[in-house]
Amino acid sequence: EGTGQSAKDYCSKCPENYLCTFGDEGLPVGSFPLGECQGDCDDDGECAPGLMCFQRDGTEEVPGCSGLGESGRDYCYDPNNTVSPSASPSSKPPPTSAPTKVPSHAPTNSPTPPPVDIIDPRSGIDTVTCPPVGGGEYDLPDGLKLFKLSGMNEFCGVFIRMSSGNLIPFARSYDSGVWEPAAGPHACLQKDITCNTDGSGVTLCGLNLPSLVNSTLAGSTYVIITKDGNIDQSSKIAAFLEMTTFGPTKSEIDSLNNIWD
């Protein structure tokens, strides 16, 4: 209750049987398997026993759940529920709204680019600096770019923002490490990344952002986002397995936890 402080964001509890997004692609591990009306699931295996994954293209009603959820997100539901609680769900969320994918203070249309320095006027290659943590997301034009490394305890990622609003991982740098491919079918290739360190110790990684105009992702844009990189041990292991395999399992994470402790 109350209005809170202006421009401050607050945690809220997802109302019972209301569509809420708790994770994506099996992460964070602690959120899976997902409960009823929770997303985003990719198949029935990511839902709790007895529940199934309801696949959506937009904001279709999910049986037994209220609210619209995030467009294109899939949610777990009880197959014994044949109709939604409301025939015409409200377009406005209840007072305690479901978590959003982007903080409310972040710009939604990425109005300004991150700091860019032209280091070679002859070639016009841009040097892209990761935006500050919590600074929202910024559009990036396609073409060759030189990316500075992320800061310590920071995660800096380039994503493909689809017209549906979903983010597809493309490349990443974290803990001041060199840029590398992200996980997923649309990520860049390792051979397409070239990193060099100059005499002053500054490392830049060259990475090309291919045009999306004539691709299956036409209408999408590249964005760059920086997040707090202070994640727990299990999440770090999950990220490592995601990078080197087709994705982590709970048993693999537990096994490596015992080795790395």
Image (tube, grey):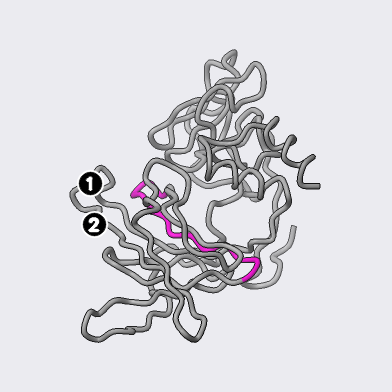
- Helix, strand or loop at label 2? It is loop
Q: Is residue 17 left or right of residue 261?
A: left
Residue 175 to residue 11: above or below: below
- Name the kind of residue labelled 1 in the image: Ser
Residue 211 shows which numbered tag?
2
Q: Is residue 132 a member of the stretch shown in magenta?
A: no
Labelled disc at residue 3: none
Q: Residue at x 37, y 83 (%)?
A: 117
Q: Which quarter of the figure has residue 6?
A: bottom right
- The x, y position of residue 166, in whole percent, is 43, 47
Q: Which residue is mark 1?
A: 215
Name the spot of residue 171 as percent of width and height, x first. 44, 56
Residue 84 image offset from top left, x and y in percent = 54, 24
Return the residue found at the far front. Answer: 199
Front residue of 227/201: it is 201
Give the magenta part as a residue range.
Answer: 152-165
Q: Is residue 154 magenta?
A: yes
Up-down: is 35 above or below 233?
Answer: above
Labelled pair 1, 2 in contact (Cβ < 8 Å): yes
Nearest the viewer among 167 and 239 is 239
Q: Secondary structure at mark 1?
A: loop
